[in-house]
Amino acid sequence: MPKVTTRTFLERKRAGEKIAMLTAYDYPTARLIDEAGVDAILVGDSLGMAVMGHDDTLSVTMDDMVHHTRMVSRAAQNAMVVADLPFLSYQVNAEEALRNAGRLVSEAGAKAVKLEGGAAQWGTAIRSILNAGIPVMGHIGLTPQSVHRLGGYRVQGKTPEDRARLLGEAQSLQDAGCFALVLECMPPDLGAAITQDLEIPTIGIGAGAGCDGQILVMHDMLGWGRTRFTKTFVDVRAAMAEAFGAYVNEVRTGGFPDGEHEYQ
C-alpha cells in the first residue's frame, strides 16, 4: 500500500471513496492501526482524556504532543500522521503557531497538523504554517479547546444562525488552504451540506454518514467510550478487565506461575 498524503485525501474525495481515520497515542497501537489499512492516524489532544486522566484537552502541552506523536510516527509505515496543535500553541500569534507546528514535524515526524476554529480567527496562523510547507487540517463544530465558551460538549449548528456560521467557517478554511476539515458533533444534514459545498474532504466525528470520511477516538471504539456517535467494534475494555482479574486471582491462589511458565 502506498503512503497516504494530502494528495491522496483529495483523490479519495474526487473518486467518492471514503477516508478512514483513527486516533493513536503510542507505538504498538499505531502499528496495529497502520497495518489495518487506515488512511491517517490523528495524534489528538484527546490524549488528555483518553490516556492522561484529564477532564478535558486544555491541559495537554506541546511537549506531550511531541512525545506521543514521535511514538506514532515511528510506527506508521503507510498512514499519514496528523498531530493536533494543543491549546495556546497557535492562539498567541502566527510565529508561535509556526514554531509549534514545526516542532510536530521536525521533532515528532508528523506529516500535517490540525487546529480548531475558523479562518477569521486563525487565518494568519494557517497561512504562516502553510508557507513553511506544513499541511493544515481544520476542525469546526464542537471544538473541545473552546469547551468553556461553548458551554460544554454540545451539538453545534442546530440554529439557522449557527448553521450559517459553520458553513461560512468551512468555506473560509478551504480558502485559507486547509487540505481537509474535521466536522465534529453536528446534525448529519449539516455535515452533508458542508461536504457538498467543499472541494476538500471532510472527516466526520458525530457529523453523519454524508462526510467524506470518519474518525473515532481509538479508545471509544474499543469499549471505553459510550457517546452516541461511537460504535463499540470490540469490547477490549471488558476483555482486559477479565484478564487482569484472572491474573490477580491466579497469583494469589498460586496458579501462576506454574512449570510451563518457569525457566528450567
Image (cartoon, grey):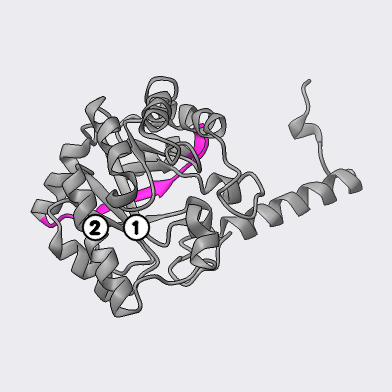
Decide: is 72 above or below 146: above
- In-image side of 51 versus 15 (left or right): right
Give residue 77's position: percent from left, percent from top: 33, 29
Give residue 180's position: percent from left, percent from top: 24, 48
- In-image side of 238 versus 18 (left or right): right
- Image: magenta residue range: 16-29
Residue at disc 2, secondary structure: helix
Query: Farthest residue toward the left?
Result: 14
Q: Is residue 19 visible?
A: yes
Pointers 2 and 1 in contact (C-beta within 8 Å):
yes
Label 1 environment density (alpha carbons within 10 Å; few <14, some 14–19, many ≥20): many
- The residue type indicated by label 1 comes to Ile
Along the viewing direction, whichever of 65 and 246 lies nearer the viewer: 65
- The residue type indicated by label 2 comes to Ala
Which corner quadrant of the image does residue 6 belong to? top left
Check disc 1 and report the residue beneath it: 140
Decide: is 54 above or below 187: above
Label 2 environment density (alpha carbons within 10 Å; few <14, some 14–19, many ≥20): many
Check disc 2 and report the residue beneath it: 170
